[in-house]
Image (tube, rainbow, N blue to C red):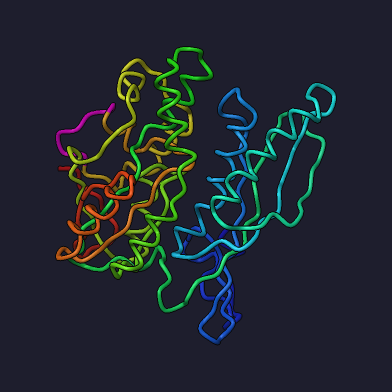
Amino acid sequence: MSSLNKNENPEILVGLETGDDAGVWDFGDGRAIISTVDFITPLVNDARTWGRIAAANSVSDVYAMGGKPLFALNLVGWNNDELSTELLSEVLLGGSDIAAEAGMAIIGGHSISDPEPKYGMAVTGEVNPERMLTNTGLKEGQDLILTKPLGIGMITTAIKAGVASDEVIGNAVDSMVQLNDVASRVAVAAGATGATDVTGFGLLGHLGKMAAASGMDTVLHVENISFISGARDFASDGVVPGGTRRNLSWITDQVDAGSFGEVDLLLLADAQTSGGLVFGVGKDKSADVCAELLSENVSAAIVGETLAGDGKISLR
């Protein structure tokens, strides 16, 4: 992909170079457009719930950049020979539910015939370039705040294996359909400049990429990190997605694991769908930020801190 990372257009504020969550185009008048796209295969059996999860996952990148979603295009791969159009309608209604909650419009889309169903969105948003959150924005001496518990990959793998209870599934779904809008708003108001959402590369992968791009080392206080109920048990039993294992293999050389073992590392590298945000704020503001997020029913904890460096993650 390195041959593609050559954007010389001055209007491009964020392109391919830094591995950010979305692209950003500057209008030059205090406004910029965010563009992102994502789609996923089914994670749960209920079609409308899957649609809600996929839509929340797609719009998350706009919030990770500190922006506001404006409109979206539906992207659908559908097995017309085996799946009904009524079922597809339920998926799209789930997407509409999330669009209404996010205050964005769905203005079109595209579908193809596909033996494996897929759904997601191409989302366009807006952001003030002066208050934009990026992968390169962490600063020395900040606290790291994480919203949403980890472990979604373990839970969705357990769902596919038929070993997840209704309670565990319900907790995971509640997390995945929750928008990152409040977390984004609070982070921007607190002066955060570096942020990312925790999705396919897991906390270690996304934080490692952001730390390296920012020229920072990070320390994670593992005891402060929350996990969805059941995730640790599944990880201990080997119910682990292949993507999580690949994440850990990819990031291992960047991590000083200290006394933590494989299960802890797998949980921290777990591939998330529609995960929360991780962002840096001044130490004098972090406690208030967490308190505000918790008051608005958003999970939040101070899970680490930043130091000058080159992207190393130390677990404590």
Q: Main secondary structure of the magenta part?
A: loop
Q: Spot the residue most to the bottom.
A: 29
* Percent of width and height locating residue 14: 51, 70
**Where is 106 relative to 203, above or below?**
below
Q: Look at the image and say whether residue 221 sits in the magenta stretch.
A: no
Residue 200 appearing in the image: no
Q: Which residue corresponds to the image point at 48% horizontal and 23% vertical from the top-left? A: 157
* Percent of width and height locating residue 283: 16, 63
Nearer-the-camera pick, 220 or 217: 220
| Magenta-colored span | 257-263
Q: In which quadrant will I find the C terminus?
A: top left
Q: Which residue corresponds to the image point at 41% horizontal and 66% vertical from the top-left? A: 133
**Where is 278 relative to 155, above or below?**
below
Quadrant of res 168: top left
Instruction: Using residue 184 as the reference point, say whether residue 257 is left or right of it.
Output: left
Q: In which quadrant will I find the N terminus?
A: bottom right
